[in-house]
Amino acid sequence: MNSNHTTSESDDMRPEYDFANMKGGVRGKYAKMFDGMVTTVLLDSDVAEVFPDSASVNEALRTLVRILRKSGTDHATDTDRRIESPNK
């Protein structure tokens, strides 16, 4: 650890946790497991105010996809299997 580091009262990391000297840790060990499972997008602030969490965003987008399919303007026909909710 950096000996010049000053600890503030909000720092709740214990001094015995010296990650610089840990052995056996592998950076990104589980990254491949999540590859392609999740896509991160940034919402504009006005849109983010409407949706409290990712579940509400996903449900709104799935609803939009169903509407587009019914109206015949579906542009996502190649992704039909990915758009369906994994919980349904």
Image (cartoon, helix red, strand yellow):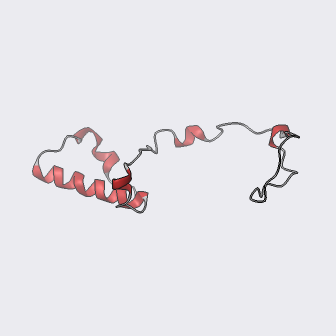
Determine the residue positioned at 17% across, 55% down.
67
Q: Nearer the viewer, residue 84 or 62?
A: 62
Q: Is residue 85 visible?
A: no
| Rendered view: 20 above or below 72 | above
Q: Nearer the viewer, residue 59 or 30?
A: 59
Residue found at the far left of this picture: 71
Question: How many marks on residues?
Answer: 0
Determine the residue positioned at 26% across, 38% down.
78
Left or right, residue 36 beside residue 88:
right
Q: Position of residue 57 (x, y in %)?
A: 36, 56
Q: Dividing the image into 4 quarters, which one contains the N terminus?
A: top right
Left or right, residue 66 beside residue 38:
left
Q: Nearer the viewer, residue 83 or 61?
A: 61
Q: Dividing the image into 4 quarters, which one contains the C terminus?
A: bottom left
Left or right, residue 26 beside residue 55:
right
| Rendered view: 37 above or below 47 | above
Q: Quadrant of residue 4?
A: top right
Q: Is residue 46 visible?
A: yes
| Rendered view: 78 above or below 55 | above
Q: Position of residue 39 (x, y in %)?
A: 43, 43
Q: Position of residue 19 (x, y in %)?
A: 80, 42
Q: Quadrant of residue 42?
A: top left
Q: Quadrant of residue 20?
A: top right
Q: Nearer the viewer, residue 13 or 39?
A: 13
Determine the residue positioned at 56% across, 37% down.
32
Determine the residue positioned at 45% across, 44% down.
40
Q: Position of residue 71 (x, y in %)?
A: 11, 51
